[in-house]
Amino acid sequence: MKSFVITVFSGMFLLISGQALAGGDIEAGKKKAAEVCAACHGLDGNSPNPAFPKIAGQYRTYLEKSLIEYKTGARKNAIMSGMAAALSTEDIDNLSVYYSSQSGLATKK
């Protein structure tokens, strides 16, 4: 039982420290979101249009991976591929940190 508790707390620590070390600038992400993403996903990531996914509160790593895959062509969507093509690595980091910090469906209080 003791080793289980240690394992659980170690995992939680790694998860939290990984988020803290993620980098990215939330304010820069918000600014880029207003320029590039808000028309479809909404400024806070809670799209009012059901045709576009709500991305607020998604894991930073998921958002980052998705944008990289759209940019490289590993993930196919004509609109998202075009939008992601113009993003720098720094933009992707900033957008991922910003949208993951927003309150979404799974994170509503």
Image (cartoon, rainbow, N blue to C red):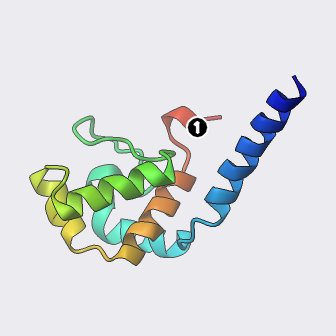
Q: Nearer the viewer, residue 69 or 87?
A: 69
Crowd rating for badge 1 (residues with CA inside 10 Å; few <14, some 14–19, many 20+): few
Dividing the image into 4 quarters, which one contains the C terminus? top right
- Outermost residue toward the front in this view: 3
Q: How many marks?
A: 1
Dividing the image into 4 quarters, which one contains the N terminus? top right
Q: Nearer the viewer, residue 13 or 58?
A: 13
- Side (left or right) of 85 relative to 88: left
In the rendering, at what x and y percent does residue 91 appear?
38, 73
In the rendering, at what x and y percent does residue 12 appear?
73, 43
- Outermost residue toward the top in this view: 1
Residue type for callout 1: Thr
Residue at 27% x, 40% y is 49
- Side (left or right) of 73 relative to 67: left
In the rendering, at what x and y percent does residue 34 appear?
37, 67
- Side (left or right) of 69 relative to 59: left
Q: Nearer the viewer, residue 10 or 82?
A: 10
In the rendering, at what x and y percent does residue 13 appear?
75, 49
Residue that badge 1 annotates = 107
Q: Secondary structure at mark 1?
A: helix
Residue at 37% x, 42% y is 54
Q: Quadrant of residue 81?
A: bottom left
Q: Nearer the viewer, residue 72 or 42?
A: 72
Q: Quadrant of residue 67?
A: bottom left
- Outermost residue toward the right in this view: 2
Residue at 46% x, 69% y is 94
